[in-house]
Amino acid sequence: MTLSDHDLSPQAPLSNAIEQLGWQDSARAHAFAKWLESVRLAHELTPDSVRAASADASFRRYFRVDAAGASLIIMDAPPDKENSQPFVDIAGLMQAAGLLVPKVLAWEPALGFMLLDDLGQHTMIQVLDTEHADANLGFFNRALDALLVWQQASRPDVLPLYDAPLLQRELQLFPDWYVGQYRGKTLDDTQKLQLQQSFDVLVARNLSAPMVFVHRDFMPRNLMVPWDAKEPRLGVLDFQDAVYGPITYDIASLMRDAFISWEEDFCIDVTVRYWERARSLGMLDHDGWHSDFGAFYSAVEWMGLQRHLKVAGIFARLSLRDGKPKYLADTPRFLAYIRATCGRYRELKPLLRLVDSIEDHTAVSGYAYGRV
């Protein structure tokens, strides 16, 4: 059912539940109330049960609503700020591949409201044992199951290409937002040249990897433990920015998480498990990776470094531009990842020195990789 412009007038009364969802725009709140009523009968919804479920780093919000003895999820994605079409398209692509993803039950593109099935109550990160890494191997093996299914479905010319211009734009977030806006520092011409040369090396190295479907934020926070304990698959969320890019990206995201860090022996353990399975599927016949885990692990580290630089910039932007300061609490984690990787490779030592100068950090030997 499509709502007309006439239907968007803020005349309908709001229930207490809808009012409690924290609307910045009263017209949007009323439009939501009318949309919810328009889908109520078809999906047996109880509108007064609507409540906040979660929010993310974008402008999207998620609500939960009761429906015929179960619950469903509502996505609130203002169309002037979020394009939901990729979410719908990629959900279909993932579902066809065999992944457990939310099913789109109703969508009003002009308003940005979407009704989805509810995969579960807890994300993977919420159920991890942070003190005993090995106790989490079952969850990480299930995460690898999902990742390998996703990658095996890969084919070119379906998703946007994760190419050099896109990688460079992402890396530029680091000097623009983290260095300039957050740290308040201005790089001189020599430093700018040094940073760009490091970026060029990083992009060239990462783009030499085989190309597959890339989730682009594949981490425990975006993996869902399903309601059904007998369901072996983890649900996959937040996939709307998926691209076709380096095979190393998602395993780097999984093990060098934005919100939780593991000691390197655990990272290696899980990455070896991925490597063994991926090479048995013929996915790592590249540059000696099939027979040399060390070469593959090095490539994962280089790919992770690109992500860490990008995310440091994104977290600074979220704080300064979007008013979401909580993300900066995880910035030290990214600086630790960046230093650990740069400190291992001769080609990255200039970048390490530059980062240390930005951070007013005096380099020491024997830097620890583990939890921050």
Image: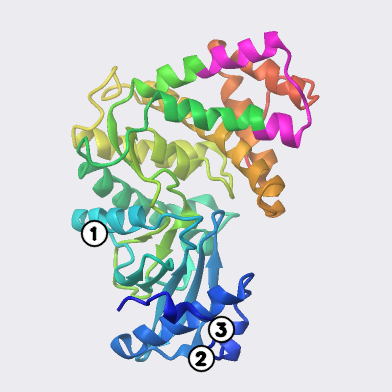
Residue at position x 56%, y 54% in the image: 57
Q: Is residue 180 above or below residue 255?
A: above
Q: Which residues are magenta?
A: 177-199
- Label 3 sits on a secondary structure element that is helix
Number of numbered labels in the structure image: 3
Distance (Cα) linking label 1 and label 2: 31 Å
Residue 48 marker: 2
Report crowding for label 2: few under 14, some 14 to 19, many 20 or more residues within 10 A (C-alpha).
few
Residue 95 marker: 1
According to the picture, the residue beneath numbered tag 3 turns out to be 18
Q: Is residue 121 visible?
A: yes
Report crowding for label 3: few under 14, some 14 to 19, many 20 or more residues within 10 A (C-alpha).
many
Residue at position x 38%, y 21% in the image: 295
Disc nearer the start of the sequence (2/3): 3
Q: Is residue 191 magenta?
A: yes
- Label 2 sits on a secondary structure element that is helix
- Report the mark closest to the observer, 1 or 2: 2
Give the overall secondary structure of the magenta segment.
Answer: helix
Q: Nearer the viewer, residue 302 or 7?
A: 7
Q: Quadrant of residue 349?
A: top right
Residue 80 in percent (x, y) is at: 49, 57
Residue 167 in percent (x, y) is at: 45, 28
Identity of the amino acid at label 1?
Answer: Gln
- Label 1 sits on a secondary structure element that is helix
User: As drawn, is 111 to the left or to the right of 59?
Assistant: left
Residue 348 in percent (x, y) is at: 57, 15
- Report the mark closest to the observer, 3 or 1: 3
